[in-house]
Image (cartoon, grey):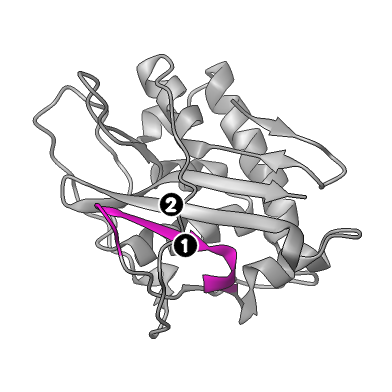
């Protein structure tokens, strides 16, 4: 499900698969290869997200974390947690959409703080990715902003260039933290999906090379 070459040239990480395995015993996740069009608008700040309860008619895990009102808020909250090295908070914004008879699964405190091996793997991956997306000499609270990307079929695919950390595009940060990697080699996107009226991070594509 997850592979990472420590040289930084070949990384593959799918949050949805890891979360689904934690809460649903191993649901297969999927990644999107399609690019969404984008138009720049005032960016969403992660701090603008307000926690609220999300109900469910299915016997799915119920989140005890924030239910984001937009894809931008979901991605900003997730990216902020990753940059700060807070995997439990990143997990709370993650979800696995319903598939067939399997109901949607969303991050919960019980799941995200559990000692399950798959959940531990998710936390380790968040920590590793955090090292590559954290600006050098970062001090204080990071300001993560996300440009608006139009949704398609209830999903939004946000490329790294549309996410900024303290004003720096995320792809620039990744390049600066790498050795011999160029922007042309990067394929980093965060997918957000609408589930029962709220938005969650449902997949991350992190490929280099």
Q: Which is more toward the observer, 8 or 57?
A: 8
Q: Quadrant of residue 108?
A: top left
Say if 79 sits above or below 128 in the image: below
Residue 79 image point, x, y percent: 53, 58
Residue at horizontal 25 percent and vertical 31 percent from the top: 98
User: Secondary structure beneath disc 2?
Assistant: strand
Q: Are marks 2 and 1 in contact (CB under 8 Å)?
A: yes
Q: Quadrant of residue 118?
A: top right
Q: Which mark is residue 142?
A: none
Residue 136 image point, x, y percent: 79, 69
Magenta span of residues: 151-164
Residue at horizontal 53 percent and vertical 61 percent from the top: 80
Q: Which mark is residue 191?
A: 2
Q: Quadrant of residue 151?
A: bottom left
Q: Which residue is mark 1?
A: 158
Neighbour tally class for label 1: few under 14, some 14-19, many 20 plus, Cα within 10 Å: many
């Amino acid at each position: 499900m997850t592979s990472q070459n420590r040289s930084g040239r070949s990384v593959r990480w799918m949050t949805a698969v890891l979360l689904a395995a934690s809460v649903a015993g191993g649901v297969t996740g999927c990644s999107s290869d399609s690019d969404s069009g984008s138009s720049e608008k005032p960016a969403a700040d992660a701090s603008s997200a307000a926690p609220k309860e999300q109900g469910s008619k299915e016997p799915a895990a119920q989140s005890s974390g924030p239910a984001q009102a937009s894809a931008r808020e979901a991605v900003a909250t997730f990216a902020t947690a990753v940059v700060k090295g807070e995997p439990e908070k990143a997990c709370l914004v993650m979800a696995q959409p319903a598939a067939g008879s399997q109901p949607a699964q969303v991050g919960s405190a019980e799941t995200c703080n559990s000692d399950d091996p798959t959940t531990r793997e998710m936390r380790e991956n968040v920590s590793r990715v955090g090292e590559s997306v954290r600006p050098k000499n970062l001090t204080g609270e990071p300001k993560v902003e996300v440009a608006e990307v139009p949704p398609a079929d209830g999903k939004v695919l946000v490329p790294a260039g549309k996410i900024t950390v303290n004003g720096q595009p995320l792809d620039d940060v990744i390049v600066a933290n790498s050795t011999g990697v160029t922007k042309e080699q990067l394929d980093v996107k965060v997918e957000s999906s609408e589930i029962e009226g709220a938005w969650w991070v449902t997949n991350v594509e992190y490929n280099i090379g």
